[in-house]
């Protein structure tokens, strides 16, 4: 894809998300979602191989079905109440349909099956866009309609997502699929807390975006598409290897790193609301995610793959990513929580 066309696609992608995030009318929100979907299809299928074409088709079908359901639920609500205002979703069937549509848009379990497949068929950079930028529009719609969405459905979706995000990632060898299941598990935590405290949901989303972008930057830089590829990271940069290990542990939610903060606050809020069984289950299932993050950290830092080549060093190509940006993101993703007392002082 030529640079001007690529720039147009990326700007359309940004425009679609911003239209959805800033609209109060359901038709404008739907138009934003459609622009967003249509802009990313060429980006996914730009690689010109059967896997990317399949990924683009799967993405198109699921996102179109979800957008159509959003439109249908808003039409039902407008028919019953006479308003297209996003914040006035008072008709119960519309709310149920909207919950399912947004769950499909985000990739929450049990509507998550498209996400690992689409990520596996995309390049690492496209996968980064799908698991970060593409979550903003549906999350903003959840934020706007949260007073009317069913808390029970969101709690069930959240628990299912954290469970399946943990179980699904255990068996994977491809880093993109591992990141897809990581995304499902993290979104499960956000869905769980959404009805109780939206501020925590926003905080969790921001920390998730920073950590995921930082980790994907390292994967893109080291061209690590499988777990075996990560064993050669040390040949590129020992500093990157250490930082990547801490990043993975932070994503797993180990204290005292940044990833621990949202999990700690969400569990605290769930226990305050007397949802103790749910808090216990969420904590147990987060251990499953922690296992595959720790496995990735182990292969990155402590193992060396059997190598048939005479040399153990990778080819070094001209780097395309900004090193200062990666440094800032990785520092935030690891040290934001430990440095917080200093910042407040």
Image (spheres, grey):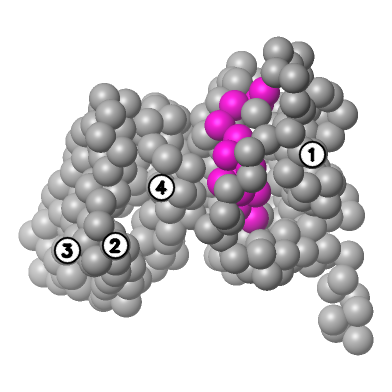
Numbered tag placed on residue 31 in the rendering: 3
- Measured Cα–Cα span from mark 4 to mark 3: 22 Å
Q: Earlier in the sequence, mark 2 or mark 4?
A: 2
Is disc 2 in contact with disc 4, using a CB cutoff of under 8 Å?
no
Query: Is 326 placed left or right of 260 in the picture?
Result: left
Is disc 2 in contact with disc 3, using a CB cutoff of under 8 Å?
no
Q: Earlier in the sequence, mark 4 or mark 3?
A: 3
Closer mark to the observer between disc 1 and disc 4: 1
**What is the span of residues highlighted in magenta in the rendered image?**
212-228
Q: Look at 79% across and 58% down and name the residue there.
A: 334
Tell whether position 215 is magenta. yes
Numbered tag placed on residue 126 in the rendering: 4
- Measured Cα–Cα span from mark 2 to mark 3: 26 Å
Could you tell me what secondary structure mostly forms the magenta stretch?
helix
The outermost residue toward the front is: 310
**x%, y% of residue 265?**
75, 57
User: Crowding at label 1, few (<14), some or many (≥20) Cα neighbours within 10 Å?
Assistant: many
- Measured Cα–Cα span from mark 2 to mark 1: 32 Å
Tell whether position 62 is magenta. no
Q: Look at 63% across and 68% down and name the residue there.
A: 325
**Label 1 belongs to which residue?**
234
Choose between 130 and 164: the one closer to the eye: 130
User: Crowding at label 3, few (<14), some or many (≥20) Cα neighbours within 10 Å?
Assistant: some
- Measured Cα–Cα span from mark 2 to mark 4: 15 Å
**Label 2 belongs to which residue?**
3
């Amino acid at each position: 894809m030529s640079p001007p066309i690529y720039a147009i696609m990326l700007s359309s992608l940004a425009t679609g998300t911003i239209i959805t995030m800033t609209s109060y009318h359901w038709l404008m929100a739907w138009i934003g979602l459609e622009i967003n979907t249509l802009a990313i299809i060429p980006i996914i299928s730009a690689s010109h191989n059967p896997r990317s074409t399949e990924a683009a088709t799967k993405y198109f079908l699921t996102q179109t079905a979800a957008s159509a359901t959003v439109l249908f639920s808003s039409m039902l609500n407008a028919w019953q109440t006479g308003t297209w205002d996003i914040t006035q979703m008072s008709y119960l069937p519309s709310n149920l349909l909207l919950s399912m549509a947004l769950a499909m848009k985000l990739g929450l379990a049990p509507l998550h099956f498209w996400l690992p497949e689409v990520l596996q068929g995309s390049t690492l950079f496209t996968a980064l866009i799908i698991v970060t930028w593409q979550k903003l529009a549906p999350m903003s719609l959840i934020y706007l309609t949260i007073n009317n969405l069913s808390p029970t459905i969101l709690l069930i979706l959240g628990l299912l997502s954290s469970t399946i995000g943990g179980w699904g990632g255990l068996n994977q060898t491809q880093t993109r699929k591992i990141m897809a299941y990581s995304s499902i598990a993290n979104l499960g935590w956000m869905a769980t807390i959404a009805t109780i405290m939206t501020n925590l949901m926003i905080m969790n989303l921001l920390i998730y975006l920073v950590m995921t972008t930082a980790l994907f930057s390292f994967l893109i830089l080291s061209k690590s598409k499988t777990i075996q590829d990560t064993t050669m990271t040390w040949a590129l940069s020992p500093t990157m290897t250490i930082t990547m290990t801490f990043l993975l542990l932070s994503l797993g939610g180990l204290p005292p790193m940044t990833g621990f903060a949202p999990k700690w606050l969400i569990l605290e809020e769930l226990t305050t609301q007397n949802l103790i069984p749910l808090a216990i289950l969420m904590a147990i299932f987060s251990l499953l995610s922690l296992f595959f993050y720790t496995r990735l950290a182990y292969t990155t830092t402590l193992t060396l793959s059997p190598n048939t080549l005479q040399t153990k060093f990778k080819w070094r190509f001209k780097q395309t990513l900004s090193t200062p940006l990666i440094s800032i993101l990785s520092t935030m993703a690891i040290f934001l929580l430990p440095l917080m007392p200093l910042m407040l002082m």
